[in-house]
């Protein structure tokens, strides 16, 4: 994935907020529910259109993006050590 991919942008925003560790932990806990979480994000999409949250929610509507975001955050955390 290129760095302009929405998941990279989402990971950047999580890091800028200083929430990398809590987000990675929550993504690990929610791992068995990736499909359910993506469906929840799909339900939230109409409510967030036209807001700043739309950019955060939209990448999470695809089930495959949840493990990709989890892996991306974990990789970045390991590189910071």
Image: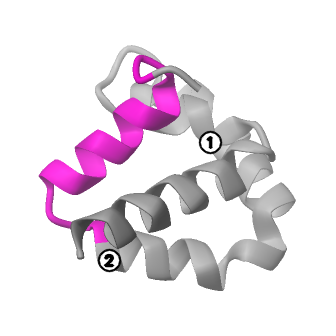
Q: Which secondary structure, mark 1?
A: helix
Q: Earlier in the sequence, mark 1 or mark 2?
A: 2
Which residue is more in the foreground, 22 or 80? 80
CA separation, marks 1 and 2? 18 Å
The percent position of residue 72, horizontal first and vertical second, equals: 50, 53
Q: Residues within 10 Å of mark 1 (few under 14, many from 20)?
A: many
Quarter occupied by the C terminus: bottom left
Circles 1 and 2 in contact, beta carbons < 8 Å:
no
Look at the picture and state if 77 lies above or below 2: below
The percent position of residue 3, horizontal first and vertical second, equals: 41, 23
Quarter occupied by the N terminus: top right
Q: Residue at x 45, y 72 (%)?
A: 24
Residue under pointer 2: 21
Residue under pointer 1: 60
Relative to residue 37, is residue 20 drawn left or right?
left
The percent position of residue 23, horizontal first and vertical second, equals: 40, 70
Q: Which secondary structure, mark 2?
A: helix
Magenta stretch: residue 15 in it?
yes
The percent position of residue 61, horizontal first and vertical second, equals: 70, 37
Disc number placed over residue 43 in the picture, else none: none
Look at the picture and state if 38 lies above or below 56: below
Give the total of numbered labels.
Answer: 2
Asked which quadrant contains residue 73, the reply is bottom left
Q: Which residues are magenta?
A: 3-20
Q: Residues within 10 Å of mark 2 (few under 14, many from 20)?
A: some
Relative to residue 8, is residue 17 drawn left or right?
left
Dominant secondary structure (helix, strand or loop) of the stretch shown in magenta = helix
């Amino acid at each position: 994935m290129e760095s302009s991919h929405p998941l990279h942008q989402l990971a950047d925003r999580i890091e800028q907020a200083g929430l990398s560790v809590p987000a990675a932990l929550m993504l690990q806990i929610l791992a068995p529910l990736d499909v359910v979480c993506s469906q929840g994000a799909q339900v939230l999409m109409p409510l967030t259109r036209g807001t700043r949250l739309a950019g955060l929610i939209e990448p999470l509507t695809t089930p495959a993006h949840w493990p990709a975001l989890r892996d991306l955050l974990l990789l970045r955390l390991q590189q910071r050590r």
